Amino acid sequence: MIGGTVKVHNVSKNFGTTQVLKDIKLEINAGEFFSLLGPSGCGKTTLLRIIAGFEIPTSGDILLDNESVINKAPNERHVNTIFQNYALFPHLTVFENVAFSLRLKKIDKNIIKSRVAEYVNLVRLQEHINKYPAQLSGGQRQRVSIARALINEPRVLLLDEPLSALDAKLRQDLLMELDRIHDIIGITFIYVTHDQEEAMSVSDRIAVMQEGNLLQVGTPFEIYESPADMFVADFIGASNNIEGKVIEVTENRAYIETPDIGRITVDLDKKLKASDHIKVTLRPEKIHISKKAPSLDSPKWNCISGKVDQMVYTGSHTRFIIKTEHGRVFKTFKQHAQYFTDEEPIQWEDNVYMWWHADDSFIVEVNGNR
Amino acid sequence: MIKNYGQRYTFPIMVWLTVFFVIPFSIILVGSFLEKGLYGGFEPAFSIEAYKALMSDTMRKVTLNTIFISVATTVLTVLLALPTAYHIARSPYKEKLLFLVIIPFWTNFLIRIFAWIAVLGNNGLVNNFFVNIGIFNSPVQLLYNKWAIILIMIYTSLPFAILPLYAVIEKFDFSLLEAARDLGATKSQSMFKILIPLILPGISTAVLFTFIPAFGNFAIPDIVGGTDVRMLGNIINERLKTARNWPSAAAISMILTTISVVMVLLFNRIISSKERKIGGNI
């Protein structure tokens, strides 16, 4: 089965005098695992509820498979929702919950029985089919709600922070489960979350939202490596933000004068001219760190020094917070790829060198423009 | 060794029930099997006269009337109270609306019944209005029949039905209705398949709070029922005070209690067969 396409056409929504969605334009492809990502209050859940039909936008239109559904009630739209609090019917068993929509359609009892069994198997709840929701764990309840929604064979499945009420380990398991189900069923998933790791790990594309605006739409790679603005850079993963003024532009790179770490060089991700004011993001994993001064073979390397301010050992890697001479703080980490290293281990308050390649930073804003 | 503390804790309620329920009930039960005194009271001699006298056509008619009036009152009251309670629970002004429901309790019960006479009487508001605009030629008798009793009983019992219904609906998780709509249910299907089954305990409280007072009521039929329509409560009142036949009044009370209890048990059975095991909160 191939899922439906969703087009969000200039949708705005006001609650009283506050505008929670500002002219959102968005196209979601058939069969895509699409995430709406943003901090709480950014409007992502409202947008999802508008697609489901629980809210009516102040202006704009929603097209499902190129057909406007704005005047259709939720029960007339071929979309189904997974709710954050599961919204299972407590007076019905797992079987009856999953069978709910089929029974409304007055389908033959034997067909219902086999269809329900099929979907309960899909979410691996066979042995709980006669239990009531109160007898299930949180993860099991959410799986029931997934089966209950999918049995309708919706064109699009809407997931409203479906994992936020679960603990971290279970969240990971259920996320992989969702990914597996998406691969089997193949319909379009629209997934609302505030957890960037969740969104990154399963999505084909992500839309980052903030205060009712759509900041960037792209693949996880695009959003992480070339964020549209500083908010996206900070919200997705950790970021070291560097600001400075362009001194000189050569054929393939530029020299930047910064107030706190001196002169650095960057790749020309965007068009620059001398005296432009720019903002650059540098991801922690792009920074090399050592106690020994590196021998750098190309002028495209940047190297600065600092003192270890904090270090956190996490097993697979150690996270460092390094403070430069001018009090500027950098986040980085060192992977523990070997059991014994030839190098002397870095300790707290050690002086260290940090270096990175000009290609590995990314110019986010030029003169305040994206 | 586990000590049974439960019995110690329930001791006060046992005393309460004994003094205010078991003893009075026993007095009525025993009294119904005694002979009547000359000027009221009981003569200490065993007799089933009081029960024999119940086998009359009048008694049968009054009993059926009583059942009809109280069942009709209960059904109509709950049907009116349900949507009212639902809208109060979902309103942004619920405190103010609840306050309006409670305001009538500030006025004496009898005065409120007499107020209805001013509304429905031959010179009342309703008749004057319809005569003035020319729909009626002369006033229509609206009082002194079954329907007047039922109307006023609905009026007096509405708050007792609205409040328990409000209590359960207010706690209801409305996202369940959205889920039902999402799964293809129409508005009314989501109400009947999800809301109603989940608020059954509140409905059953509302039914009992309406049915029991209506069934034993005598003030309302006494004032607006006229001579035609009498309920069991009126007969008890009349046997006790006019006929001075205490054993007869006691026997009718026993019938009234028995029918009430049977009705309540029957109803509870219907409810509990529908009310599936939910097994705790979600």
Image (spheres, rainbow, N blue to C red):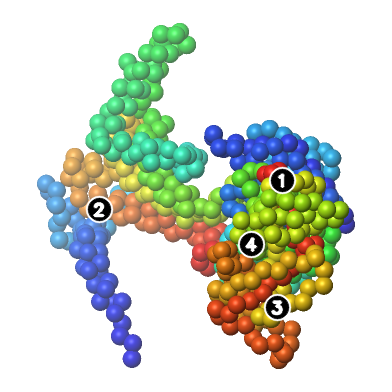
* Sequence-wise first label, 3 or 4: 4
Q: Give the residue number, with chain letter if any, for mark 3.
A: A293
> Label 4's element?
loop
Which numbered disc covers residue A276?
1
- Residue bearing the label numbered 2: B250
Q: Report which residue position mark 4 lands on.
A: A261
Residue B122 position (above or below residue B260): above
Residue type beneath disc 4? Ile
- Viewer-proximal residue among A144 and B275: A144
Location of residue B136 with respect to B92 vertically, above or below = above
Whichever of labels 3 and 1 marks the residue nearer the N terminus, that label is: 1
Which residue corresponds to the image point at 64% horizontal and 40% vertical from the top-left? A21
- Quadrant where the N terminus of chain A lies? bottom right
Q: Is residue A120 left or right of residue A85?
A: right
| Label 1 CA crowd tier, 10 Å (few <14, some 14–19, many 20+) | some
Residue at 51% from the left image edge and 66% from the top image edge: B280
1 vs 2, front mark? 1
**Labels 2 and 3 share a subunit:** no
CB within 8 Å, label 2 to label 3:
no
Real-space CA distance between mark 3 and mark 1, rounded to the nearest whole angstrom? 32 Å
